[in-house]
Image (cartoon, grey):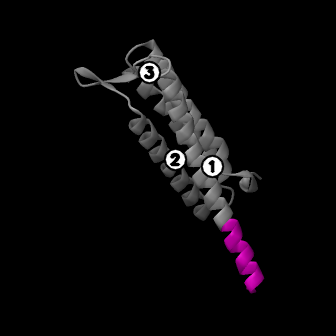
Amino acid sequence: MTNAIKHLDLTRTTARRTGRALTVIAAAAGALLLWAVNDPWGGNDLAVRQGDGARHLGPAAVVVAALIAGLAAWGLLALLERTIRRPVLPYRIIAAIVLILSLVAPLGSGVGTSSRLALLGMHLTVGAALIIGLPGRQNCR
């Protein structure tokens, strides 16, 4: 391989990683924005049932959960890229199934209708960003 080809390949890899990192960050930012609109600005106390009581969801919990989901999705996509020829469709199918299953949590543990709706919105926002954005345009064939 010539140096120009190696450099081009390294540039593409760096651009792909940067785009994926930005997608994960954007997904977390979207969830945080929904939290901010609903909790401190909207006056809704976003809480989930935990044991016999309820636990208030703060911004750190929202961001950490979104980042964990994003990194897990990125890991799944990387694994599929290394093992199958056309990874995007299987990735999107698996991610959509995981998103649908994740919706059970806010429906079952959200305290009150406003909490449930806000949590559903956060799940859907993060899921949509990761399902659509993580593979990037170059892999959509």
- Image coords of residue 50 (percent x, y): 28, 26
Do labels 2 and 1 touch, CB within 8 Å? yes
Q: Which residue is mark 3?
A: 107
Q: Secondary structure at mark 2?
A: helix
- Image coords of residue 95 (percent x, y): 56, 42
Q: As shown in the figure, which amino acid type bears the numbered disc 1?
A: Leu
Q: Classify 92 as above or below 79.
A: above
Q: Secondary structure at mark 1?
A: loop
Q: CA distance from mark 3 to mark 1?
A: 26 Å
On the rendered structure, is 81 left or right of 104? right
Q: Work out whether residue 40 or residue 8 is closer to the camera in this orientation and state it.
A: 40
Residue appearing at x 45%, y 22% in the figure:
39
Q: Which residue is mark 2?
A: 70
Decide which of tag 2 and tag 3 comes sooner along the chain: 2
Q: Main secondary structure of the magenta part?
A: helix
Q: Classify 48 as above or below 3.
A: above
- Image coords of residue 82 (percent x, y): 59, 64
Q: CA distance from mark 2 to mark 1?
A: 9 Å
Look at the image and tell me in which quarter the N terminus lies: bottom right
Q: Secondary structure at mark 3?
A: helix
Residue appearing at x 22%, y 20% in the figure:
52
Q: Classify 99 as above or below 50.
A: below
Decide which of tag 3 and tag 1 comes sooner along the chain: 3
Q: CA distance from mark 2 to mark 3?
A: 21 Å
- Image coords of residue 136 (percent x, y): 69, 52
Q: As shown in the figure, which amino acid type bears the numbered disc 2?
A: Gly
Q: Work out whether residue 32 or residue 50 is closer to the camera in this orientation and state it.
A: 32
**What span is colored magenta in the figure?**
1-13
